[in-house]
């Protein structure tokens, strides 16, 4: 079998000063230019290399090197680059501008622009940074590419990178990070701007979301707007996008709202549009510092999507991005007991991974590889970063570590893995993986039995739930109730797999318990008063029995209005569900439940739901959807692999010298006829 590796390099000329600041910034300091290469130390954090430059850059924007002080300039709008460029061009084109009033002026003439000649001063050619590439589907030769540059602008080549045409003069200073093309209408192209994956640093805002309807010749900003009509801060940085292959108007994107340095605890978001960017719906919000740096769809099933999340691992969607859940991530994070006091749904990440990249097999959507480097803050600026490679064969439920057969540690992410991390599964062989940062390597799994270990967890999966309903959290066992309430009144039920079903025709009776008016959290069982039973717009099933068996359920009527209903304020929408491991009785004659403390009898889980933003509760309009609570036992292994270098950017390397891989995705071009491929790097 032949393999063709097509390396795309972009050369730029640049000049720079070496900037440095005092080593300790416990107090406000003035930034000074200094050729001495010293790191910046702030508290217990150290910034050097690109991190140091990012810190200085953020200090300039902040108006003070001490980022703990209030900013002198406030929060920069996400589209500041776009606004500044428009204003500059407006002034330049004004008939009153000095360049137009006095076109012969040496100071304001365009002579230098038109006649300047730049020479490469070395030390050698280095590639410019390109974060996104489309192989234009309108060209069957695969020679037409559309690329986005981090220095600004979108370009097009029709000869595999020999010549380029500038497509977006209005986006010349936008930090383009993601491009996708419509499959139904390839003239539709979406572009995202702003880097959220520079995890230890501030990231670059870009101007957010753009759309072209004519193949890239003209662009419009389709970002989410705030109440004043400005680009919403949540669209400050766009990491990745996935377009629905059957509908070009359906787009799912990962965003980040952060605007300060590493101390910014801004969350990552997943947004979705179903009308080409006219309106946007928030689908998922991560915890503090949980940036969503990648979205990817399964090549063989567009309904299955995965997202990589720092400190967590991966999220999964089985409904095309409408709802997301943690598939387990056993082997990446610790196991999760059913009675975890923090709950089972909204739990803090327990891994020390910062930048995570994943790829999915073309043939099996359950086979994934994951490349990760560690959280720099986790080491308190001491110790070494690591580079780890994992494989999952069950859709992210469990992950197996892959190590080199010769006993050496992987290190391809140790240098700048927080910034440049990319991975690709061989298109025709799921045992071969390409991974890159500054260098590119190829790993091949060896056919040896891995060293096993057992683990278990309780995971929550959803299907199409977020179109109308959101989950605040789910608790199990002794975490249900206050103090010893559950231990006192539950009668120790078996914890079996539970499925809650919504949709047309789905209904059962539920025991209704009232609470004192104005109740919020921490209501003891003694203040739950049994009232009666009513119909609710869902069904609860025990999925551990064969066949599945319908279960009893009670709920807290927080509104004391005689029915189950939700609203968009989760603090007020406390109509808790209590799943009870007792076969459902349509006559509702279970005396152990219809009494004081009965909501805890044989109760396994408490489920806290509320309505999706912008919706009004209407039980008759609930779509077909599910919530599953599943106990998982898994065996994870440590596999071995062979490793070879493909590129090495250090002079003196034996293969593909001076190629610095600074791209965040591999873009394969396949030849299905002879199972060969090339890829743009």
Image (cartoon, grey):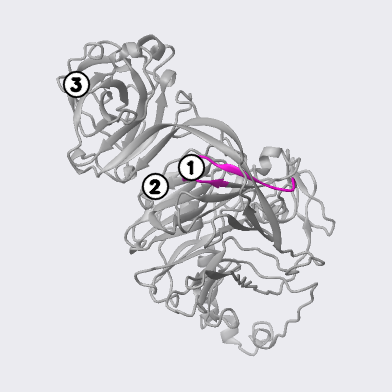
Q: Nearer the viewer, residue 50 or 325?
A: 325
Q: Callout 2 environment at 10 Å: few (<14), some (14 to 19), or many (20+)?
A: many
Give x and y (percent) for residue 473.
40, 32
Q: Nearer the viewer, residue 34 or 130?
A: 130
Q: Is residue 653 magenta?
A: no
Calculate the distance from the C-alpha at mark 1 to the C-alpha at mark 2. 10 Å
Q: Earlier in the sequence, mark 2 or mark 3?
A: 2
Q: Secondary structure at mark 2?
A: strand
Q: Earlier in the sequence, mark 1 or mark 3?
A: 1
Quadrant housing the C terminus: bottom right
Give x and y (percent) for residue 382.
76, 40
Using residue 558 as the reference point, say whether residue 66 is left or right of it: right
Q: Which residue in the protein does label 3 denote? A: 585
Using residue 297 as the reference point, say whether residue 12 is left or right of it: right
Q: Nearer the viewer, residue 205 or 242?
A: 242
Q: Which residue in the protein does label 1 denote? A: 286
Residue at position x 35%, y 39% in the image: 470
Q: Is residue 394 magenta?
A: yes
Q: Which stretch did the figure color magenta?
A: 391-407
State the mark number for residue 283. Answer: 2
- The reply to whether discs 1 and 3 touch (Cβ–Cβ < 8 Å) is no
């Amino acid at each position: 079998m032949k393999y063709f590796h097509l390396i795309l390099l972009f050369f730029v000329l640049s000049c720079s000063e070496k900037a440095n600041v005092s080593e300790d910034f416990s107090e406000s300091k003035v930034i000074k230019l200094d050729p001495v290469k010293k790191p910046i130390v702030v508290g217990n954090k150290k910034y050097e290399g690109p991190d140091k430059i990012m810190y200085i850059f953020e200090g300039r924007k902040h108006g003070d090197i001490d980022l703990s002080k209030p900013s002198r300039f406030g929060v920069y709008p996400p589209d500041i680059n776009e606004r500044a460029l428009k204003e500059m061009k407006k002034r330049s084109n004004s008939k009153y501008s000095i360049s137009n009033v006095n076109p012969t002026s040496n100071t304001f003439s365009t002579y230098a622009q038109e006649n300047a000649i730049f020479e490469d001063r070395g030390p050698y050619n280095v590639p410019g940074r390109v974060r996104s590439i489309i192989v234009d589907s309108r060209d069957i030769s695969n020679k037409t590419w559309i690329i986005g540059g981090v220095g600004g602008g979108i370009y097009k080549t029709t000869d595999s990178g020999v010549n380029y045409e500038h497509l977006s003069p209005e986006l010349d200073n936008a930090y383009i990070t993601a491009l996708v093309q419509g499959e139904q209408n390839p003239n539709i192209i979406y572009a995202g701007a702003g880097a959220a994956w520079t995890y230890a640093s501030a990231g670059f805002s870009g101007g957010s979301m753009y759309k072209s309807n004519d193949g890239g010749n003209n662009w419009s900003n389709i970002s989410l707007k705030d109440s004043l009509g400005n680009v919403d801060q949540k669209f400050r940085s766009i990491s990745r996008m996935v377009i629905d292959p059957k509908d070009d108007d359906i787009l799912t994107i990962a965003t980040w709202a952060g605007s300060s340095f590493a101390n910014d605890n801004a969350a990552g978001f997943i947004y979705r549009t179903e009308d080409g960017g006219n309106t946007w719906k928030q689908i998922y919000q991560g915890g503090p510092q949980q940036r969503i740096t990648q979205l990817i769809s399964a090549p063989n099933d567009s309904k299955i999507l995965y997202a990589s999340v720092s400190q967590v691992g991966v999220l999964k969607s089985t409904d095309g991005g409408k709802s997301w859940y943690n598939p387990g991530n056993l082997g990446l994070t610790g196991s999760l007991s059913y009675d975890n006091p923090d709950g089972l749904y909204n739990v803090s990440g327990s891994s020390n991974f910062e930048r995570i990249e994943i790829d999915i097999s073309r043939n099996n959507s359950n086979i994934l590889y994951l490349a990760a480097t560690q959280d720099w803050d986790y080491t308190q600026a001491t110790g070494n970063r690591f580079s780890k490679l994992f494989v999952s064969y069950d859709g992210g439920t469990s992950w197996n570590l892959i190590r080199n057969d010769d006993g050496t540690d992987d290190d391809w992410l140790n240098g700048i893995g927080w910034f440049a991390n990319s991975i690709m599964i061989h298109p025709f062989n799921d045992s071969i993986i390409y991974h890159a940062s500054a260098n590119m390597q190829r790993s091949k799994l060896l056919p040896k039995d891995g060293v096993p270990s057992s683990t278990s967890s309780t995971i929550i999966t959803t299907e199409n739930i977020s179109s109308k309903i959101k989950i605040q959290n789910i608790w199990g066992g002794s975490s249900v109730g206050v103090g010893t309430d559950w231990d006192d009144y539950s009668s120790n039920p078996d914890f079996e797999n539970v499925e809650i079903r919504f949709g047309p025709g789905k209904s059962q009776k539920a025991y209704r318990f009232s609470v004192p008016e104005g109740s919020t959290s921490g209501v003891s069982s003694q203040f739950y008063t049994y009232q009666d039973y009513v119909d609710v717009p869902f069904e609860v099933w025990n999925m551990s029995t064969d066949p599945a068996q319908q279960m009893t359920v009670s709920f807290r009527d927080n509104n004391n209005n005689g029915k189950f209903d939700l609203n968009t304020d989760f603090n007020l929408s406390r109509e808790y569900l209590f799943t009870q491991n007792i076969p459902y009785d349509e006559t509702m004659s279970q005396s152990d439940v219809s009494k004081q403390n009965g909501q805890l009898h044989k109760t396994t889980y408490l489920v806290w739901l509320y309505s999706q933003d912008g919706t009004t509760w209407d039980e008759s309009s609930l779509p077909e959807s599910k919530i599953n609570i599943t106990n998982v036992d898994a065996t994870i292994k440590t596999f071995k692999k062979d490793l070879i270098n493909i590129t090495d950017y250090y002079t003196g390397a034996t293969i593909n010298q001076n190629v610095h891989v600074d791209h965040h995705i591999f873009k394969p071009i396949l030849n299905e006829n002879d199972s060969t491929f090339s890829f743009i790097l």
